[in-house]
Amino acid sequence: MSVSVGVIMGSTSDWETMKKACEVLEELGISYEKKVVSAHRTPDLMFEYAESAVSRGLKVIIAGAGGAAHLPGMVASKTVLPVIGVPVQSKALNGLDSLLSIVQMPGGIPVATVAIGAAGATNAGLLAAQIIGAFDPAVQERMTERRARVTREVLDNAELPS
Ligand code: RP5
């Protein structure tokens, strides 16, 4: 059976952030692959990855990058699969550069952009699961159970020390 979600990132230095997306996918039992694919350093590989994604059976691509973060937008331009962009927190500008590079796509080529850094990567994993879950009742059921667990955990810890 083919892998459902492709998790790609511009550099090995993005892994610390992007592993949050993979952790969520693992928790929800969604098959995924992970790979460094750089828009700037390996542009031919990026094109090949995006162009072959549909035929390889991927359903969603999560792409994380920092700085001049072209990866999600360029991948989105070469596939009709939904692309979720994760702005990795950069050193120089704290990820604002990554966010603006990813979120400000011109009309016609969408990238679903999440928050900067680890929270964004976690949400990218969840959003990918929700997209898969819309067509896979078992995944949707696991998402529903996860939501209920998170709610329970908050309610169980709602009381603050006086
Ligand atoms: C981007 O440049 C990567 O996505 C990474 O966030 C950033 C820095 O890359 P390294 O210099 O750490 O390889 O392409």
Image (cartoon, grey):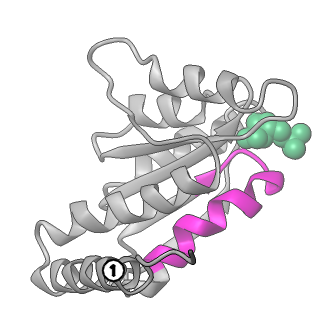
Magenta span includes 137 = no
Helix, strand or loop: magenta stretch:
helix
Q: Residue at x 52, y 36 (%)?
A: 72
Q: Quadrant of the C terminus?
A: bottom right
Amino acid type indicated by mark 1: Leu
Question: Image height check: is 113 above or below 5?
Answer: above
Name the residue nearer the viewer: 134 or 162. 162
Outermost residue to the right: 92
Q: Residue at x 87, y 26 (%)?
A: 92
Magenta span includes 17 = yes
Image location of residue 30, percent across then percent down: 37, 80
Mark 1 highlights which residue?
A: 155
Magenta stretch bounds: 8-25
Picture quadrant where residue 125 is located: bottom left
Picture quadrant where residue 68 is located: top right
Outermost residue to the top: 106
Q: Residue at x 42, y 53 (%)?
A: 61
